[in-house]
Image: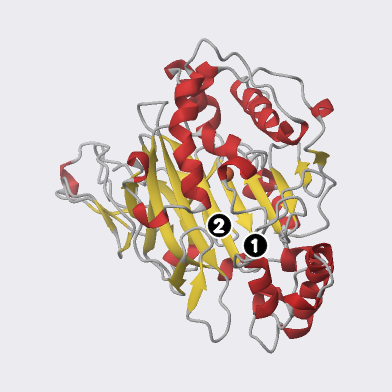
Amino acid sequence: MTLHAPPPPLSGRDPANLRGDAITGDRYFSSEFAQREWDMLWTRIWHIAGRTAEMPEPGDYVVHNFMKESVICIRQEDGSVRAFYNSCAHRGMRMVGQSSSADMIACPYHGWRYGLDGVLVHAQDPEDFPQGNPCGKLKLRELRCDTWGGFVWYTMAEQGPSLAEYLAPMPDVYRNYPMDTAVRVAWYRIALNANWKFVTDNFSESYHTRTAHPQVPPWIDQDVDTARHEMWPSGHGRTVQPMRPSLSDRLPEHLPHPYKMILQAWGIDPDSYASYEDLAMQGWLDLKAAKRRLWKERGYVHYEHMNDEELTDSPHTVIFPNVTISFLPDNLVFFRSEPHPDDPGKCYFDLWCMAFPVEGQETVESIMAGPRPLKEATECEHRDFDAGRGIPELAGQIVYQDMELAEGMQAGLHSKGYQDAYLSAQETRVRFFHEVLNDWLEGRRP
Ligand SMILES: [Fe+2]
C-alpha cells in the first residue's frame, strides 16, 4: 500500500455531521435486521481471518468461521496468501476445523485433496466421472484476500473496494506503527449475551469511562475537552486521549500512581514537580522528550518513526463496522465482535492483546490481560462470559468491566421504555456508526 498524509477527519464531537437516524432497540434483537446485516453488510465488508504471524510458511493456514460461513486463508509457495471457502467442490463438506498446516487441503468424507492453490489434485476413482476427471479441473471457490497491519483479511464480495480502499485512511493514519512486529500475547474469544453492536457502540465513546472504569482517569485523561474525536465518512473513527492524569479526577496522595511509575521508568522524578498540574502537563512533555532521547539505547525499536503524540498517547480506533484497535505506545489491543449465527442477542467478543517487542524484555504488560510472557499465544481461549465467571483472570480489567455491562444493555434495549438514544456531543460517533450501517443496509455503500 502506498502511504501518504491522511485526509482531514470530520469532527466526531459535532452532531451537525449526523442525519439523526434513530438507534432503535429492534436493531439489537430482530432476526430480520440480523438477516439484512448478513445480506448487505457481512457478505460485503473485509473480515480479519487471523495474524500473518500464524502462517509464516507455505501451507500454513488459518480458518475463520463467521456465522455459518467458513473460510481458509493459506500461505502460498510464493509467500502470498489466498483465501478459499471451506467447502469441498465435491459435495460441499466442510473440510478443516481449525488453523493448522498442510501440504494439501484434504476432505475427510471422500478423500478429495486440493493443492495450496485450491486446485483439486486427487480424487478417488477419477475416471468414474461421466463429466470428466475432476483433477486439475475443479477448484475450491476463491475469495479476495490481502494483508494489512499484520492481519490477514478477506472479503466475500467479488466486486467492490480493495482492502486499501476499504481501510482508508487508517493505513496512512497509522503508518508510523510497525504493526507487523506486534506479538499477540493474549488471545481470547468470549461468548457474550449481547448483540455485536454493543461492542462498537461502547468503543465509539469514552463518556462511560468515569462510571465504568474509575481506574482510568488518573492514567488516561478523560476530561471532555482534552480528547480529540475524529471520524471519516467510511465509518472509521477514533478518540485520541493524552495518557496523562486527568486534572479533575485525582487519586488520593497515598495511593500508588500509575502515571508516576511510567515517569520513573523513563528516568523522571515525579516528585520534582511543584504542583499536580505541573506533574500532569510538564511531566507528559518531559516523558515524550525522555522517550525520544532514550528509545534506542533501551531497545524500544518500535518508537523509531512515532511522532510526539504516538510516543505517549492513546488513539482508540474503530474500523467500521466491528473492529477496534487501541493503539498504545507499547501495545496494540484488538477487539472485535462477531454475531452469533442464530441469535441476534448474542455475539462473540475477540480480545487480542499484542505488544511490541522491546530488546531485553521477556515479560510485557498486556494492558487488558495483565503481565504475559513476550511470545505468541499458540491457541485461542474460548470462554463463555457467564456473568464474569467464565473468565476470572480478567476480573477488574477495563475490558471485563465493559463485558459486565453488555447483558444489562441488551436487556434494556428490549424495553418499551426505550425509543432512541439521547446522546452527548462526545457520543456523536455512536449515532454515526448506526447511520453508516444504515447506508450499507439500504444499499448506498460501498
Ligand atoms: Fe469501556
Residue 1 is marked as: none
Residue 429 horizontal/vertical position (percent): 70, 34
Horizontally, residue 260 falls left or right of residue 392, namely right
Q: Quadrant of residue 210?
A: top right
Residue 119 visible from this viewpoint: no
Residue 42 horizontal/vertical position (percent): 51, 33
In the rendered view, would you say 284 is above or below 351? Answer: below
Which residue was labeled with disc 1?
328
Q: Quadrant of residue 258?
A: bottom right
Horizontally, residue 113 falls left or right of residue 278, namely left
Q: Residue at x 60, y 13 (%)?
A: 419
User: In 3D space, how far apart are the residues under numbered discs 1 and 2 (Cα atoms)?
Assistant: 8 Å
Do the numbered discs 1 and 2 sit on residues whose CB atoms are within 8 Å?
Answer: yes
Horizontally, residue 339 falls left or right of residue 292, namely left
Q: Residue at x 66, y 32 (%)?
A: 430
Residue 34 horizontal/vertical position (percent): 47, 23
Mark 1 is on which residue type? Leu
**Mark before the other along the chain sequence, 1 or 2:** 1
Count neighbours of disc 1 (C-alpha within 10 A) and say few if under 14, some if 14 to 19, many if 20 or more: many
Residue 333 visible from this viewpoint: yes
Q: Residue at x 64, y 73 (%)?
A: 261
Work out whether residue 176 or residue 123 is closer to the camera in this orientation and state it. 176
* SS at badge 2: strand
